[in-house]
Image (cartoon, grey):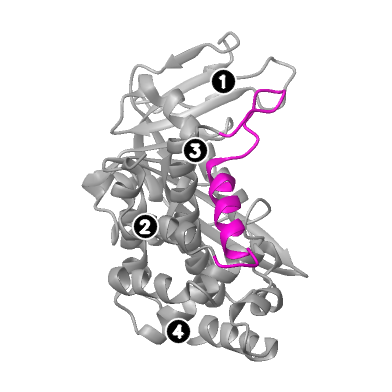
Amino acid sequence: MPYAQSITDVLSAHLGWHRVRLKFMARFTAALLKMTTTNLRESAIALKAEVKEVSNCRCIRRFLSSYEMDFAVLGRFLTRLLPKSAPYKVVNDRTEWHFGTQPVNVLMAGIAHRGVAFPISWTVLPDGGSSSASEHCRALRCFSQVVEPSEIEAVIAGREFISAKWLGWLQAREIPFLVRLRSDRHLVSPEGTSLPAKVLARPLALRQVKVLDREYSLRGTDGKSADVRVVLKRVADRSAEDQFLILATSGIDPAEATGLYQEHWQVETLFAALKSRGYDLERTHLTEPDRVQRLIGLLVLAFGWTWLVGERRVNREGLPRKKPHDRQERSLFRYGLVRLRSILAAPAPQPAAFFECIRGVRSPTAFLSCI
């Protein structure tokens, strides 16, 4: 495959892994960007043209089943691709899909940047359904192998990440956080009075925000507790089922909480890029956690490169045009994906265009600063 050697050289400089493995990663990255699917049989078609499809497919499966990837090293490489310096807003969320009756359940931690959560650390869970406090702690422990706790501006998470054990774990490590609570979550006052959060929020007018003037305690069934500042906002009228935004904060200014929480939705942009709007992750048909873990490692590598190319296109050509409803026709990710795919899928090699794009992985800062 054209260009695989150049991609291999760049990966070798940053990762330092066995060159045979890096050569496979380079070929798979190019095939993924060309085919935009993680269906292994379809990816095998573009992996190595002079090799039979069945042999290519066997090569992919062998890598995903047995190669031990150092995800901390990969995560540090991804932070070098990120055109942003510390402190970081860290966005946590979970996505789940099914192959037949078998769930595939992924916890993701990314750094918020220009409308997307840049993927840094991920954990594939063994079962479906909501994740536990222990799994949240383990996932952020993996993230902390890449990013120091002192470099985290805030951990931002949704209503699944609300256990007192998890929040206490963050406080013990002096990691600021902002999490959304369910409206029926009980808040315990310093006097010991326990009330559902929605009771305290009911007097608010539509879009009114209130910061409770003292700390409240969140308590778990395991006896753990965490003292937090609470921010209330009415986001819908009284006829709606979900009327309130309830936020628990620690280590950040509560007055900034509602604006900061908007960063959480950037992880949905990432999930869309990995799945329906980009690499079609749900079509992989893999269900074994360790294999999905490795596959996501390959995908986020391609994502980082794609995003850089998209951001460079914006710097040079301006934002994608807008549709009539005033939304951009393409995200920065799609902007980069279209560019890379047009190069890799072209009938004739385009070395000048390719080497311009590969500069983004070699030296992201110089790549983005050169207009």
Residue 306 visible in the snapshot: yes
Residue extending farthest right? 100
> In the rendered structure, which disc, 1 or 3, sits on the residue that comes first in sequence?
1
**Which of label 1 and label 2 is nearer to you?**
2
Residue at the spot of label 2: 359
For disc 1, the neighbor class at 10 Å (few under 14, some 14 to 19, many from 20) is few
At x 62% / y 88%, what residue is drawn? 50
> In the rendered structure, which disc, 2 or 3, sits on the residue that comes first in sequence?
3
**Which of label 4 and label 2 is nearer to you?**
2
Mark 4 vs 2: CB contact within 8 A: no
Residue at the spot of label 3: 264
**Which of label 1 and label 3 is nearer to you?**
3
Q: Position of residue 48 (x, y in %)?
A: 59, 82
Residue 159 sits in quarter: top right
Number of labels in the image equals 4
> In the rendered structure, which disc, 4 or 2, sits on the residue that comes first in sequence?
4
At x 31% / y 41%, what residue is drawn? 369
Determine if the magenta segment contains residue 337.
Answer: yes
Q: Is residue 160 above or below residue 38?
A: above
Q: Which residues are magenta?
A: 320-349
For disc 3, the neighbor class at 10 Å (few under 14, some 14 to 19, many from 20) is many
Residue at the spot of label 1: 199
